[in-house]
Image: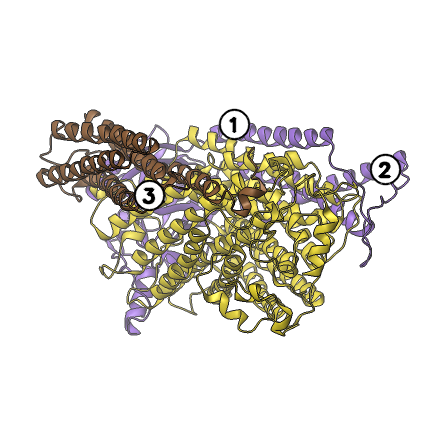
Chain colours: A brown, B purple, C yellow
C-alpha cells in the first residue's frame, strides 16, 4: 500500500501531498454521502411496493417530459465540466472559466426547472407517503445541486488568484467529482421516480 | 532487557492430567449451572416454554464451560506468569501459531453454526406468528381483526386491543375483558391491534412476545399448558405510563373457562380499573408537575375489569 | 521545570499546550488544529458528559431501588433514561474514542498530524455545540426527548404539547450534528491511515489500534448516513406533517426500525473495535510478549466490519419480521462470534507465558477481557431467536449491553487513559489511586449489571419506572452497584487532575513499550517527528524478538530523552 516519503511529510512536496489527501478525502466522503441517497432510494422502493395507498387521491402520476429535459441538461453539464477540466490541464484559463461557467448555468437551469415542476404539482409534501418521499428525494438532491454550484463559484473565483494552480488542480478535480456524483444520483432518482411509474 | 525467559520444563503427562482434570471439573460446573436455569426463570406455562428454556439451558452450559476455561487460563497466567514490579524481562517471544489459530477459528464457527441450525428447528416448532396485514386506520384494524377466521379446535380469534395504556380482549361472541382468560391445553389464536403507538404483547410465563404495530393486524397463536395467574406486560416502550400497562392472564380448566365466558356478558359494560388513569389523575391533582405526557386513552369499556389487588404467580 | 527559560522560544509561541508553561490550560479552549490538542479536548469534554450521563443514571437507579414509581414522575423517568442513553453514546463514548483516534493515529504511524487538520478542529467544535443543544433541551417547556434513545415513532412523533420546537426536535438536530461531526472525523481518520504512514510501515507493520480504528471508521462512513436519513424522515414526520412512519398516512413504523438499526447495530462495533485495539496494544506491553497472531487479529477487525453490516434485524426478532428473516439474521449474528473469538483467544494466548505486570491499565484490560467473555456469551444467547423472543426488551438486554458498553468498552477507555497518560501529558499518574479506581469499578459494575440478567429472565421489561415486587432484590443489588460506580469516579478524577497538575515527570517510555509513539518525547512536540520521520523496519510488539522497530532506533530514544 502507499506510504509517504519524508519529503512529503516535511512539506517540500507539501501541496501535492495534500492534493492527494484532498482527493482521497473527497472520494471517501462521496462514497459515504451516496449511502444516504441509497437509504432514501430503499425507502422509496419499500413504500412503493408496500403502501396500501401509493399515489395521493387525484394524482395519476408524474409528468415526464419537462423533467426529462432537465435531466438531459444536467447530465450534459457533466460533460461540459469535463471539458472545463481539460482546458485547465492545458493551461487555458479562460477556456476553463467559460466551460465552468456554462456548467454552472446548466446546473442553475436544472434547479430552476425543478422549482417550476414543484410549483406545478397537484400534491404537497404532506400528501401521503408519495408526497413525502417525492419532495424529500428531489429536495435533498436539489440541495446538493445548489451546493455544487456554490462550490463551482468558489473555484471560479479562485481561478482569478495568481499562482492558484501551482500546487495542482485538486480543488477543481474535487468539485468536478462532486458534480458527477450529483449527476449519477439524479439518473437513478429519475429512473425510480419518473420511469418506474405504476 | 530483551533476554528470553527460559521455557519452563513441562511434563507432558502432568499437563495432560491437569488439563483433563480441569476440563472435567468445568464440565461438572457447567452441568450444575444448567440445572440451576429453572430457578432463574418463571414457571413454564405454555407449550413453547420448555423449548425456550431447553435452548437457554444448553447455551448456559456451553457458555459456562467456555467462560470457566478462559478465566482459568487467565488466572493461571496472572498467578504464575507474573513479573515483579521492576522486572523488565521479556516473556516468551511467541508471535503466533497458525494451527492454534485455525483451531480457534473453526471450532467456534462449528459451535455457533450448530446452535443456529438446531435453533432453526426450534423456531419451526414454535412458529406462532401467522401473518401480518397492513391497514390504514383504527376502524379498518378492528374490522380486519374481528372478521379473521381461526383454525378448527383453536379458540379464537381473540382480539387484543392495545392502547396507551390499557389492554382489552374481545372474545368471539363479544365478551370484552381486561383480563385475559384462557383454557388450559388448548391452542388460542389472537389478532393483535394497536390503536395508537407500538406496544409489546409479552407473557414471561409463556416465554412469548410479539410487538403490536399500529397500522397492522398481526395474527398470533399460542397454547397455555399450566393453570395459574400470570402477568402480561407491555414490553415495547409506549410513552408516558407504559410501566403500568400490565394485566393478568388467567389460565383455567376448560370448565372454569366456559363458565367464565358464560357469566361474563351478564356484567354490564363498564370502564375497567386502569393504573395509568389513576396515576394521571393523581398527577393532575398534584398540579400537573412533570414533563408533558400524552393523556391516557379512556379505560376500555368491558364486562370484566382488572382487579388492582390481584396477585400473580409469574 | 516551570520556568519558561528551559523552553525553546519557538515551542512557547506554538499554539499547542506546553506543560509547565504559563497559561498552558488556556490553549485547550482555543480553535487548535493540532491533533494532540484536539484529542485531549475530546477526552476532557467527554469525561464531563460521562459524569452527566452518570448523574442521570444515579437518579434512575434511585427510582428503581423500590418497585413503585415514587421518586420522580414517570414522564421525568422517561426523559431520564432517554437522555442517559443519548448522552452516554453520543456525548461520551463516540467523542472519547475520537479523542484517542486523534492522539494515537498520527503518533503511531509517524505522521505529523491528521490529513485535514482544520476539518479535524471543526469536527471537534461541533461537539460542544450539539452537547449544549442536548442539555438545553432539559429547559424547554416540553422537556427533553422522552422516547428512548431509539426514538421509535409513533411515540417519538406524538409531541403532546404540539409545539414546533420541542425536546424531540432538538434531539434529532443534536444527533444529526453529531453525525456530521463523526463523518468529518471518519473521512479524516481513514485518509490519514491510508496515506500518511511512515516509510516502511506497510499495513501489516501498522499498530493494531490503527487497524481497528480504520475498521471502525469505515463502519461510520457506511452506516451513519442511513441514520441521518432516518433522522431526517423522523424530523419531517414530527415537524412538517409528512407520514413516512405514520400508518394513518400510509407510512410504516417498521421502516424506521430498519433504518435505525442498520446504523445502530454497526455503531456498537464502532465503539468496541477501538477498545479491541486498545486491548491488543496493551496486553503485549504488560505481558512483554508479542501480540499473538497479529495478522489474523488485524484481518478479523475488517471481518467484524463486514459482518456488522448484515446483522441488524436481530434487534427486531419480536417485531413482526417473517420467520425466514429471523433465521437468516440469526445465522449472520452468530457468525460475528467468530472474528470476535479470534481476538479474545489471541489476547489470552498473548498472556500465556508472558511476564505480566499488573499495573492499572493491565488490570482494566484483564477485567475488561473477563467481562467481555461473559458479554459475548449472553450475546450468543440473544442471537438465538427463541431466547430473544423471551428476553428481548427486558433487563436481560440492558444487562448484556452494559456489560459490553461499560464493563468492556469503558474499562478499555480507562485502561487507555492510564496507559497513554504519561505520553501525552508528560506526567505519571498515581498508581495506588488507579488500583483503587479499578477495584471499586469492577465490584460496582458487576453488582450493577449482573443481577439485571436475572431480572430480565424473570420477565422485567426495560425502560420501566415501576415494576412488580418480585424484581425487587435484583434492583436493590443493581442500585447499590450503581452508587458504588458513582463513588468509583472520585479516585479516577482526583488522579487525573492532581497527576496532571503536580504528578512526577514521566519518562518518554515508562512502560518500556515498543511503538512509534514511545520514541517521541512526553508530551510529543507539534508535528511529532517533525522532519525526522523514522523508517519502520519491523512490527511493534517485538518483545523478546530482538528486532529493531525503526532504523537508527537509538538516536530516537536519545532524542526523546533529551527533549
Q: Is residue A152 left or right of residue C27?
A: left
Classify 10 Å Cα crowding around label 2: few (below 14), some (14-19), many (20 and above). few
> Which is more toward the observer, A121 or C166?
A121
- In the image, residue B226 above or below residue C127: above
Residue matched to label 2: B15
- In the image, residue A11 above or below residue C1: above
The disc placed on residue B121 is: 1
Dot 1 or dot 2: first in sequence order is 2
Residue matched to label 3: C229
Task: Count how many numbered circles sit on residues in the image.
Answer: 3
Classify 10 Å Cα crowding around label 3: few (below 14), some (14-19), many (20 and above). many
The residue located at (38%, 45%) in the rendering is B201
The C terminus of chain C: image quadrant: bottom right
Label 2 chain ID: B
Element on which disc 1 rests: helix
- In the image, residue A170 above or below residue C95: above
Label 3 chain ID: C
> Residue C195, image x and y in percent?
52, 39
> Which is more toward the observer, B149 or C57?
C57
Q: Quadrant of residue A73?
A: top left
Classify 10 Å Cα crowding around label 1: few (below 14), some (14-19), many (20 and above). few
> Residue C44, image x and y in percent?
52, 63
Amino acid at each position: 500500500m502507499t506510504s509517504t516519503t519524508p519529503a512529503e511529510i516535511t512539506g517540500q512536496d507539501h501541496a501535492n501531498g495534500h492534493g492527494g489527501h484532498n482527493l482521497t478525502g473527497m472520494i471517501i466522503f462521496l462514497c459515504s454521502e451516496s449511502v444516504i441517497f441509497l437509504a432514501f432510494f430503499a425507502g422509496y422502493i419499500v413504500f412503493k411496493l408496500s403502501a396500501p395507498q401509493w399515489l395521493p387521491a387525484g394524482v395519476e402520476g408524474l409528468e415526464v417530459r419537462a423533467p426529462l429535459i432537465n435531466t438531459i441538461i444536467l447530465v450534459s453539464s457533466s460533460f461540459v465540466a469535463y471539458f472545463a477540466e481539460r482546458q485547465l490541464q492545458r493551461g487555458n484559463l479562460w477556456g476553463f472559466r467559460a466551460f465552468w461557467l456554462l456548467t454552472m448555468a446548466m446546473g442553475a437551469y436544472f434547479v430552476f426547472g425543478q422549482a417550476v415542476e414543484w410549483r406545478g404539482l397537484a400534491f404537497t409534501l404532506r400528501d401521503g407517503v408519495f408526497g413525502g418521499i417525492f419532495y424529500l428525494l428531489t429536495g435533498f438532491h436539489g440541495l446538493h445541486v445548489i451546493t455544487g454550484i456554490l462550490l463551482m463559484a468558489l473555484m471560479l473565483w479562485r481561478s482569478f488568484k495568481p499562482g492558484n494552480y501551482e500546487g495542482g488542480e485538486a480543488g477543481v478535480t474535487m468539485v468536478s467529482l462532486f458534480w458527477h456524483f450529483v449527476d449519477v444520483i439524479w439518473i437513478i432518482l429519475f429512473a425510480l421516480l419518473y420511469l418506474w411509474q405504476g | 532487557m530483551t533476554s528470553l525467559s527460559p521455557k519452563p520444563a513441562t511434563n507432558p503427562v502432568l499437563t495432560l492430567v491437569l488439563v483433563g482434570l480441569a476440563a472435567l471439573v468445568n464440565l461438572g460446573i457447567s452441568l450444575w449451572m444448567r440445572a440451576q436455569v429453572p430457578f432463574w426463570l418463571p414457571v413454564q406455562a405454555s407449550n413453547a416454554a420448555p423449548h425456550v428454556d431447553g435452548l437457554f439451558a444448553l447455551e448456559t452450559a456451553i457458555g459456562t464451560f467456555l467462560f470457566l476455561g478462559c478465566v482459568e487460563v487467565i488466572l493461571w497466567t496472572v498467578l504464575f506468569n507474573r513479573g515483579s514490579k521492576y522486572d523488565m524481562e521479556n516473556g516468551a517471544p511467541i508471535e503466533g501459531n497458525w494451527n492454534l489459530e485455525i483451531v480457534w477459528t473453526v471450532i467456534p464457527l462449528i459451535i455457533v453454526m450448530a446452535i443456529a441450525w438446531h435453533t432453526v428447528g426450534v423456531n419451526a416448532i414454535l412458529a406462532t406468528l401467522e401473518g401480518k396485514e397492513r391497514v390504514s386506520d383504527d376502524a379498518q384494524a378492528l374490522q380486519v381483526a374481528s372478521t379473521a377466521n381461526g383454525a378448527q379446535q383453536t379458540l379464537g380469534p381473540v382480539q387484543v386491543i392495545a392502547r396507551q395504556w390499557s389492554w382489552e380482549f374481545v372474545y368471539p361472541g363479544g365478551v370484552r375483558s381486561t383480563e385475559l382468560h384462557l383454557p388450559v391445553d388448548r391452542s388460542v389464536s389472537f389478532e393483535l391491534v394497536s390503536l395508537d403507538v407500538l406496544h409489546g404483547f409479552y407473557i414471561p410465563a409463556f416465554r412469548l412476545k410479539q410487538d403490536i404495530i399500529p397500522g397492522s393486524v398481526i395474527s398470533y397463536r399460542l397454547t397455555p399448558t399450566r393453570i395459574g395467574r400470570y402477568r402480561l406486560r407491555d414490553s415495547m416502550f409506549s410513552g408516558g405510563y407504559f410501566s403500568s400497562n400490565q394485566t393478568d392472564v388467567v389460565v383455567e380448566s376448560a370448565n372454569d373457562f366456559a363458565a367464565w365466558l358464560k357469566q361474563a356478558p351478564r356484567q354490564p359494560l363498564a370502564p375497567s380499573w386502569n393504573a395509568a388513569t389513576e396515576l394521571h389523575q393523581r398527577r393532575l391533582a398534584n398540579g400537573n408537575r412533570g414533563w408533558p405526557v400524552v393523556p391516557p386513552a379512556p379505560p376500555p369499556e368491558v364486562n370484566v375489569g382488572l382487579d388492582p389487588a390481584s396477585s400473580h404467580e409469574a | 521545570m516551570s520556568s519558561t527559560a528551559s523552553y525553546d522560544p519557538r515551542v512557547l509561541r506554538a499554539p499547542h499546550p506546553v506543560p509547565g508553561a504559563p497559561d498552558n490550560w488556556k490553549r485547550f479552549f482555543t480553535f487548535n488544529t493540532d491533533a494532540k490538542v484536539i484529542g485531549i479536548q475530546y477526552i476532557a469534554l467527554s469525561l464531563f458528559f460521562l459524569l452527566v450521563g452518570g448523574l442521570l443514571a444515579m437518579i434512575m437507579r434511585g427510582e428503581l431501588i423500590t418497585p413503585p414509581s415514587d421518586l420522580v414522575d414517570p414522564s421525568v423517568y422517561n426523559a431520564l433514561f432517554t437522555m442517559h442513553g443519548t448522552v452516554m453514546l453520543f456525548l461520551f463514548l463516540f467523542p472519547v474514542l475520537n479523542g484517542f483516534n486523534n492522539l494515537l493515529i498520527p503518533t503511531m504511524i509517524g505522521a505529523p498530524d491528521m490529513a485535514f487538520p482544520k476539518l479535524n478542529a471543526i469536527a471537534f467544535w461541533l461537539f460542544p455545540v450539539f452537547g449544549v443543544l442536548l442539555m438545553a433541551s432539559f429547559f424547554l417547556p416540553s422537556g427533553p426527548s422522552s422516547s428512548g434513545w431509539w426514538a421509535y415513532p409513533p411515540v417519538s412523533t406524538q409531541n403532546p404539547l404540539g409545539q414546533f420546537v420541542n425536546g424531540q426536535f432538538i434531539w434529532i438536530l443534536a444527533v444529526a450534528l453529531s453525525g456530521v461531526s463523526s463523518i468529518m472525523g471518519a473521512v479524516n481518520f481513514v485518509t490519514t491511515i491510508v496515506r500518511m504512514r511512515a516509510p516502511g510501515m506497510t499495513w501489516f507493520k501498522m499498530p493494531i489500534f490503527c487497524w481497528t480504528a480504520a475498521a471502525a471508521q469505515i463502519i461510520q462512513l457506511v452506516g451513519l448516513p442511513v441514520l441521518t436519513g432516518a433522522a431526517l424522515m423522523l424530523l419531517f414526520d414530527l415537524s412538517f406533517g409528512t407520514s413516512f412512519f405514520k400508518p394513518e398516512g400510509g407510512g410504516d413504523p417498521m421502516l424506521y426500525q430498519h433504518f435505525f438499526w442498520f446504523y445502530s447495530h454497526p455503531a456498537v462495533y464502532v465503539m468496541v473495535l477501538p477498545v479491541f485495539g486498545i486491548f491488543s496494544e496493551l496486553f503485549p506491553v504488560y505481558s512483554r510478549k508479542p501480540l499473538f497472531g497479529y495478522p489474523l487479529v488485524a484481518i478479523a477487525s475488517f471481518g467484524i466490519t463486514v459482518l456488522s453490516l448484515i446483522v441488524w434485524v436481530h434487534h427486531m426478532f419480536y417485531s413482526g419480521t417473517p420467520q425466514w428473516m429471523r433465521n437468516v439474521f440469526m445465522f449472520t449474528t452468530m457468525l460475528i462470534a467468530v472474528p470476535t473469538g479470534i481476538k479474545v483467544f489471541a489476547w489470552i494466548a498473548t498472556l500465556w507465558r508472558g511476564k505480566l505486570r499488573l499495573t492499572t491499565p493491565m488490570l482494566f484490560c484483564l477485567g475488561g477481557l473477563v467481562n467481555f467473555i461473559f458479554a459475548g456469551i449472553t450475546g450468543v444467547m440473544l442471537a438465538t431467536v427463541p431466547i430473544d423472543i423471551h428476553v428481548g426488551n427486558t433487563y436481560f438486554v440492558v444487562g448484556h449491553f452494559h456489560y459490553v458498553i461499560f464493563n468492556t468498552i469503558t474499562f478499555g477507555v480507562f485502561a487507555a487513559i492510564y496507559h497513554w497518560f504519561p505520553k501525552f501529558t508528560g506526567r505519571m499518574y498515581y498508581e495506588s489511586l488507579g488500583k483503587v479506581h479499578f477495584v471499586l469499578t469492577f465490584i460496582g459494575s458487576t453488582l450493577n449489571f449482573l443481577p439485571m440478567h436475572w431480572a430480565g429472565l424473570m420477565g422485567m421489561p426495560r425502560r420501566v419506572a415501576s415494576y412488580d415486587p418480585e424484581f425487587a432484590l435484583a434492583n436493590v443489588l443493581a442500585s447499590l452497584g450503581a452508587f458504588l460506580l458513582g463513588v468509583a469516579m472520585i479516585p479516577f478524577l482526583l488522579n487525573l487532575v492532581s497527576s496532571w497538575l503536580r504528578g512526577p515527570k514521566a519518562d518518554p517510555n515508562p512502560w518500556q513499550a515498543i511503538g512509534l509513539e514511545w520514541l517521541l518525547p512526553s508530551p510529543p512536540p507539534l508535528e511529532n517527528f517533525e522532519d525526522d520521520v523514522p523508517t519502520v523496519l519491523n512490527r511493534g510488539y517485538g518483545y523478546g524478538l530482538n528486532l529493531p522497530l525503526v532504523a537508527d532506533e537509538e538516536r530516537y530514544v536519545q532524542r526523546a530523552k533529551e527533549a
